[in-house]
Amino acid sequence: MRLPNHPATDSLTLTRVLHALSDPARLSIVTALATQGPLACGALNLSVAKSTASHHFRVLREAGIIQMQAEGTQFINSLRKADLDSRFPGLLDAILQSPHID
């Protein structure tokens, strides 16, 4: 299993984070991780094809929003809340508290 790369905290950009959070499917992933804690990819029950779900996880990981850690044959996803808060204080909380427009 190939381990994913994660961007360093100081390389996170607001543009990339906001782009990643602009998609409803990705926003629902982030909301689930914020409320339920770390989850495996399959535990999120996304209503999209597996390849599309993989794309969404990649966008979130490359933006620095989630951390993917290999555990057996699956990846466990968790929010990089501390990293995001140190780089963009209050941004993630504001997004998660706002009403989501679908």
Image (cartoon, grey):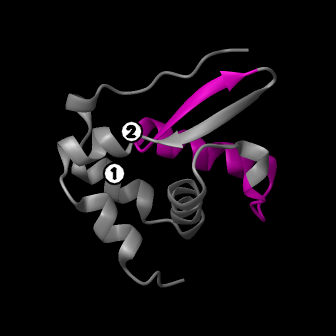
66 left or right of 75 in image: left
Amino acid type, residue under disc 1 in the picture: Val
Q: Circle 1 sits in a helix, a strand or a loop, which is it?
A: helix
Q: Quadrant of residue 93?
A: bottom left
Q: Point out which mark residue 17 bears.
A: 1
Q: Quadrant of residue 80?
A: top left
Instruction: Please state the extent of the stretch shown in magenta in the rendering.
Output: 44-71
Q: Residue at x 74, y 60 (%)?
A: 46
Q: Are marks 1 and 2 in contact (CB under 8 Å)?
A: yes
Q: Circle 2 sits in a helix, a strand or a loop, which is it?
A: loop
In the rendered image, residue 90 lying in the magenta stretch gets the answer: no
Query: Which of marks 2 and 1 precedes in the sequence?
Result: 1
What whole-number distance in Å separates the C-alpha atoms at marks 1 and 2?
A: 7 Å
64 left or right of 89 in image: right
Residue 38 versus residue 18 in the image, above or below: above
Amino acid type, residue under disc 2 in the picture: Gly
The foreground one among 39 and 88 is 39
Quadrant where the N terminus sits is: top right
Residue 9 versus residue 36 in the image, above or below: above
Q: Which residue is mark 2?
A: 64
In the rendered image, residue 55 lying in the magenta stretch gets the answer: yes
The foreground one among 66 and 13 is 66
Pinpoint residue 28: horizontal percent, then vertical percent.
Answer: 58, 65
The foreground one among 4 and 36 is 36
